[in-house]
Image (cartoon, rainbow, N blue to C red):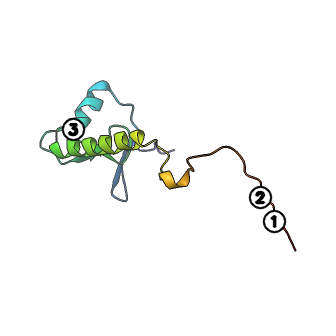
Amino acid sequence: MADKQSSGEILGIPYNFERPSLGRLLSSYWQPGKGMLVEKPFGIGYTLNLANWRSWVILAVAGGLYYQQQQSGGAGGTDADVPEDDDGPVEVIVDDD
C-alpha cells in the first residue's frame, strides 16, 4: 500500500500536514526577502509573512475595521432599524366593513 504524501501542492495551492515544530512555526511567519504571502506551516494555503511591511498594513486595516465594528454595536444594521420608543408589542385591529 502506498504511503500518503503529507505535503505538496494541489492545483497550485500548497498543503502541509506534517506535525509542526516550534522552529518551523516561527520561521514560516518571519521570512525576510519573501513576498507578503508564504506557505502555511500547517494546513492548506498561504499566510501573512510578518517580515514584510505590507502584512502589517493589512493587519492594521483589519484591526481598525474590527474596532470600528465593535464600537458601532456590532449589529451590522443602522439606527433606522430599531425604533427609539420601543414600549413593547403593538396590537393592530383591522375593521372589515
Q: Nearer the viewer, residue 18 or 80?
A: 80
Is residue 62 at least partly visible in the picture? Answer: yes
Chain-order first, disc 3 or disc 2: 3
**Nearer to us in this view, 84 or 27:** 84
In the picture, measured across the screen, residue 63 lies left or right of residue 79, that is: left
Q: Is residue 77 visible?
A: no
- Label 1: state its secondary structure: loop
Amino acid, disc 1: Val
Residue 59: quadrant of the picture: top left
Furthest residue in direction right, as rendered: 97
- Single out the residue that lies furthest toward the bottom: 97
Front position among marks 1 and 3: 1
Q: Which residue is mark 3?
A: 50
Q: Which mark is residue 94?
A: 1
Q: Which mark is residue 67?
A: none
Which residue lies under the disc numbered 2? 92
- For badge 3, the amino acid type reads Leu
Q: Residue shown at 35%/30% (left/top)?
A: 20
